[in-house]
Image (cartoon, rainbow, N blue to C red):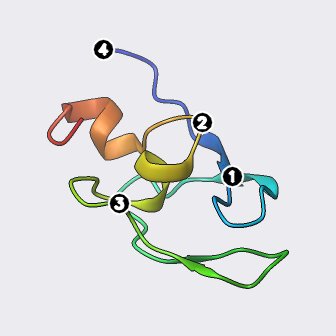
């Protein structure tokens, strides 16, 4: 079994602000508010969560199953 990475750096596409976040292991995160510009990020079409759209690492459910990646 592959090691699941639990930290991902989210980068806001609006202002470029980046922040390392710990990802939930049992769910996808659909909304994330940028701490800099306050824009609410949502997944891009076809992605399951904000980590898959704007993160440096895909979310744990995708890492484990590859269901959407």
Picture disc at residue 11? 1
Question: What's the mark number on residue 1?
Answer: 4
Measured Cα–Cα span from mark 3 to mark 2:
15 Å
**SS for dot 1:** strand
Residue that label 3 marks: 44
Task: Mark 1 or mark 4: name the one nearer the start of the chain.
Answer: 4
Q: Nearer the viewer, mark 3 or mark 2?
A: 3
Nearer mark to the viewer, of 1 and 4? 1
Reply above or below: 26 against 61.
Answer: below
Which residue does the image show at 46% across and 60% down from the upper left?
50
Q: Which element type, helix, strand or loop, lies under badge 3? A: loop
Q: Residue at x 14, y 39 (%)?
A: 67
> Can you identify the residue that label 2 sits on?
56
The span from disc 2 to disc 1 (Cα, nearest Å) is 8 Å
Q: Is residue 13 left or right of residue 63?
A: right
Name which quarter of the figure residue 49 lies in.
bottom left
């Amino acid at each position: 079994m592959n090691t699941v990475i639990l930290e991902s750096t989210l980068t806001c596409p609006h202002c470029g602000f980046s922040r390392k976040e710990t990802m939930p292991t049992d769910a996808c995160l659909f909304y994330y508010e940028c701490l800099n510009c306050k824009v609410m990020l949502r997944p891009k079409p076809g992605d399951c969560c904000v980590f898959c759209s704007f993160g440096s690492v895909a979310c744990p459910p995708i890492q484990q199953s590859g269901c959407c990646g």
